[in-house]
Image (cartoon, rainbow, N blue to C red):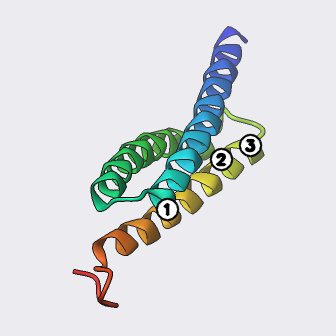
């Protein structure tokens, strides 16, 4: 019983970290697209990359829990995983936009 409560506590902490990470990601995302200069844009993209890496690590933990038989209610975990994967897609688009030169339609 104590192990189950400990696991639930861990899951709640990770879900909270995911929520915070997604909020930070969205804030940085806004900064990337409102940045005036290219240097600033690249700095924000670096921050975005760090944040997506954190989210990916949390996603790996969530995947482990989803495949585990110990966890009964998997819907919040599945929802968090989908949210992280959506942010990963967003990051991919941002990365492509940044690597595309202003006068070119082809990425490097």
Q: Give the label, 2 or 1, closer to the camera.
A: 1
Q: Work out whether residue 12 or residue 42 is closer to the camera in this orientation and state it.
A: 42
C-alpha separation, residue under disc 2 versus residue under disc 1: 25 Å
Q: Give the label, 1 or 3, closer to the camera.
A: 1
| Contact between labelled residues 3 and 2, with CB atoms less than 8 Å apart | yes
Where residue 47 sits in the image (x, y, percent)?
37, 44
C-alpha separation, residue under disc 2 versus residue under disc 3: 6 Å
| Quadrant assignment for the N terminus | top right
State the SS at label 3.
helix
Quarter where residue 101 is shown: bottom left
Where residue 99 sits in the image (x, y, percent)?
29, 73
Q: Residue at x 34, y 90 (%)?
A: 105
Q: Residue at x 32, y 81 (%)?
A: 102
| Quadrant assignment for the C terminus | bottom left
Residue at the spot of label 3: 76
Quarter where residue 85 is shown: bottom right
State the SS at label 2.
helix
| Contact between labelled residues 1 and 2, with CB atoms less than 8 Å apart | no
C-alpha separation, residue under disc 1 versus residue under disc 3: 30 Å
Q: Work out whether residue 73 or residue 79 is closer to the camera in this orientation and state it.
A: 79
Q: Taking 11 as reference, is 64 left or right?
A: left
Q: Residue at x 78, y 39 (%)?
A: 73
Residue 17 vertical placement versus 59 (above, below): above
Q: Work out whether residue 74 or residue 35 is closer to the camera in this orientation and state it.
A: 35
Residue at the spot of label 1: 33
State the SS at label 1.
helix
Q: Which mark is residue 80?
A: 2
């Amino acid at each position: 019983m104590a192990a189950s409560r400990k696991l639930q506590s861990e899951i709640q902490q990770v879900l909270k970290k995911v929520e915070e990470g997604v909020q930070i990601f969205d804030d940085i995302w806004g900064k990337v697209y409102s940045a005036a200069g290219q240097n600033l844009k690249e700095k924000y993209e670096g921050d975005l990359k760090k944040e997506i890496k954190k989210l990916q690590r949390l996603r790996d933990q969530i995947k482990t829990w989803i495949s585990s038989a110990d966890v009964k209610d998997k819907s919040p975990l599945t929802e968090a995983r989908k949210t992280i994967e959506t942010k990963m897609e967003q990051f991919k688009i941002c990365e492509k936009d940044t690597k595309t030169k202003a006068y070119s339609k082809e990425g490097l």
